[in-house]
Each structure stands twice: as structure tokens, then as C-alpha cells.
Image (cartoon, rainbow, N blue to C red):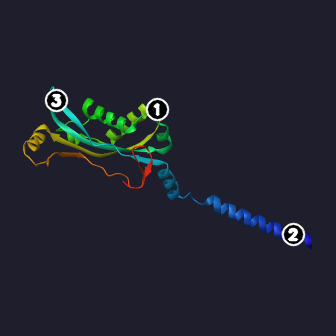
Amino acid sequence: MLKLIITGIWVAAVTLGSVYFSIQMSKAPDPNAEEAKKKAAQELVRGEIVTYPVIAQGRVDGYFLARASFVADKAKLAEVTLPVPALLTDELYTELVGDKVIRIGENRNFDLKAFKDRVKQALNHKLGSEVVLDVVIEQIDYLTKQEIQDAISKPGSSVKHGERLVGEKLPEDVPLADSKGNNTATH
């Protein structure tokens, strides 16, 4: 009789264990937990507003005002000894002035996604690993030389014209790094 009771308890325990294990294995992984883990490993590094000349036929025709930021892998960014925002500025200069990716008057053909991918790949190539996860082009404006001269010639005036070529918003859910690479809570 005692053997029968022990066998029944053992069968019940094995059955409950196998049902619990089956339920645990059949649950889909929580996508929010995976996304939160991914976001926790990222960091936003803001670039500076920089002016790039538009040179045509040996003279300056106007200027790009550009600000780009990037989302980076925290761990890989900590290993980088180079000033990454300066590399971003250099790459934007190469793309906008050297390679003339944006051609004034042909802005309808500008592919922002391809431009961002190109900048991201170039930065990662210079850094030697996949440090930059995404590039955010906050602003690319074009001001003609005449618009700037008109604003300078009138006391108390500012440049009110210009052509907004690109403008993106920063991601809200990625922590912002300060100039030393430390996290800050605000954007």
C-alpha cells in the first residue's frame, strides 16, 4: 500500500513538472524586454552645428548648416579613443563638400536613408568596428551667400530665409551622452 501511494505521488510530481516545463517552453519571448535590453546598450551622442561651404566654379555660392548626431553601442564607444563627434563632422564635410551628395537645385533626388547609411558605414570603417548604430540628421539647411550678405548688411537683422533640406527628431528613448561620454538624463 505504501508503495502505491509513493508511486502515485511520484507520477503526480512528474506530470506537474512536465506540464510546467511545457508551458514555460511554449511562451514566446517578451519583445518589450528584448527592445529594452537593446536600448539600454545604446547611447546618443549629439554633434555640433557646423557650417560647410558650397563651392562651385572656384567660388563659394552658399553654406550648408548641418547638425548630425548618432546612436552608438555604449560598450564599443567606451573603447574608442578618438573624438567621435569630430569624426562625424569630418565625414559630413566629406559627403557634403567633397563628394557633393546634396546638389543644390536637385534636392528632390536626395535619398536621406542612403546618405545616413553612407555616413554610418564610413564612421564604422574609420573606427574599425560597428560603434555607430544609427545616424540622425537633425538639420541640413542651405543658405545662399546673398542671403547671408543681406542679413549682415542690415543692423539687427538675422537670416530668416534659407532652405531646410533635412530635419529629423532625436530618439527619445536613448540616453544622451555628455561631451565626456557620460550619460545624462535630458536631451
Residue 6 is tagged as 2
The vertical placement of 9 against 100, above or below, is: below
Is the residue 184 above or below the residue 103 in the image?
below
Check disc 3 and report the residue beneath it. Answer: 56
Mark toward the start of the polypeptide (2 vs 1): 2
Tell me what residue is drawn at x 48 percent, y 45 percent.
74
Q: Residue at x 11, y 42 (%)?
A: 152
Q: Mark 1 to mark 3: distance in Å?
A: 34 Å
What label sits on residue 128 in the rendered view?
A: 1
Q: Is residue 98 left or right of residue 131?
A: left
Please name the amino acid that badge 2 sits on.
Answer: Ile
Residue at image coords 42%, 55%: 185
- Check if mark 1's residue and mark 3's residue have beta carbons within 8 Å: no
Measured in 3D between alpha carbons, the distance from the residue under mark 2 to the one under mark 3, in whole angstroms, is 92 Å
Q: Position of residue 173 (x, y in %)?
A: 42, 55
Q: Amino acid at mark 3?
A: Ala
Q: Using a 10 Å C-alpha cutoff, classify the residue at mark 1 as few (fewer than 14 neighbours), some (14 to 19) or many (20 or more).
A: few
Q: Nearer the viewer, residue 171 or 26?
A: 171
> Residue at the location (49% across, 55% down)?
36
Frontmost residue, 71 versus 118: 71
Task: Name the outermost residue toward the right.
Answer: 1
Examine the image and state in which quarter residue 25 appears. Answer: bottom right
